[in-house]
């Protein structure tokens, strides 16, 4: 693997970790009396939950954030940024959506790439990419007593799967990994933005309620 590819992978993973930490911290502040430890814990779990689950399923040890302390620094920086710029962030429309979307885009392509690098079949690698992206948010939603977004009609995990499939197809066609990262991530962001902008949703499954 060339140095530039290693650099872009590391940069994307650190950025994704920071974005998810901000997302988790902002979600935690919606409680009546948020305090620093609780906000930090939710930000931490949001940032490392999906990647840790992916690594455990793939048998990849030590976990990324255990092996490289820069991920912890990114989480702490994200939480501090969420506090320092909180008044500004809360004035911006869809702030949580922005950081969550950037996080799932980066973690999807990183999870897919890591699975492929470990020799996992392409279809399973795409699933691992989706797991990397959404499971941190699922854990965050459960801990903050909110319905996980994957249970709603909003296009979320589906965008991750489609982005992961794009990555796998480009990789099979021999495209450079840097290009794969950028294009697959852009697909996820565009699908999420279009889904929210035009209120796109998947068909509902029969419900007993």
Image (cartoon, rainbow, N blue to C red):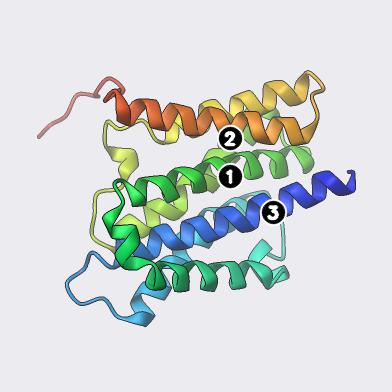
The residue under label 2 is: 185
Image: 99 above or below 168: below
- Asked if 41 appears above or below 203 in the picture, the reply is below
Q: Which residue is depicted at the point 56% across and 35% down?
A: 127
Few, some or many C-alpha atoms within 10 Å of disc 3 (few <14, some 14-19, many ≥20)?
A: few
Please provide percent x and percent y for residue 66.
Answer: 67, 71
In the picture, measured across the screen, residue 66 lies left or right of residue 53, that is right
Distance from Cα at disc 1 to Cα at disc 3: 10 Å
**Which quadrant is the N terminus positioned in?**
top right
Please give the residue where the numbered disc 1 appears in the rendered image. Answer: 106
Q: Are marks 2 and 1 in contact (CB under 8 Å)?
A: yes
Identified at 38% across, 66% down, the residue is 25
The one nearer the camera, 1 or 92, is: 92
Is label 1 or label 3 in front?
3
Q: What element carries label 3?
A: helix
Relative to 160, say whether 90 is above or below.
Answer: below
SS under mark 1: helix
Q: Earlier in the sequence, mark 2 or mark 3?
A: 3
Residue 119 in the image: state x and y as whole percent.
Answer: 78, 38
Q: Give the residue drawn at x 34%, y 59%.
A: 89
Report whether residue 143 is seen.
Answer: no
How packed mark 2 is, by other alpha carbons closer than 10 Å (few <14, some 14-19, many 20 or more), is many
Judging by the rendered image, the residue that carries numbered circle 3 is: 11
Quarter of the figure with the C terminus: top left
Q: In terms of sequence position, does the residue under pointer 2 or pointer 1 come before the other?
A: 1
């Amino acid at each position: 693997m060339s140095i530039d590819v290693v650099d872009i992978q590391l940069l994307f993973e650190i950025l994704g970790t920071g974005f998810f930490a901000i997302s988790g911290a902002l979600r935690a502040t919606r409680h009546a009396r948020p305090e620093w430890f609780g906000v930090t814990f939710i930000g931490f779990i949001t940032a490392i939950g999906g990647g840790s689950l992916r690594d455990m399923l793939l048998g990849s040890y030590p976990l990324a954030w255990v092996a490289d302390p820069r991920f912890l620094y990114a989480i702490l920086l994200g939480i501090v940024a969420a506090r320092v710029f909180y008044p500004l962030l809360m004035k911006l429309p869809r702030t949580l959506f922005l950081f969550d979307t950037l996080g799932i885009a980066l973690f999807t392509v990183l999870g897919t790439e890591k699975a492929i690098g470990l020799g996992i079949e392409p279809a399973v690698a795409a699933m691992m990419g989706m797991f990397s992206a959404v499971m941190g948010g699922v854990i965050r939603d459960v801990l903050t007593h909110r319905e996980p977004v994957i249970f709603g009609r909003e296009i979320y995990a589906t965008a991750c799967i489609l982005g992961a499939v794009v990555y796998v197809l480009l990789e099979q066609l021999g495209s450079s990994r840097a290009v794969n990262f950028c294009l697959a991530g852009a697909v996820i962001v565009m699908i999420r933005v279009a889904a929210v902008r035009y209120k796109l949703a998947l068909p509902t499954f029969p419900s007993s309620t």
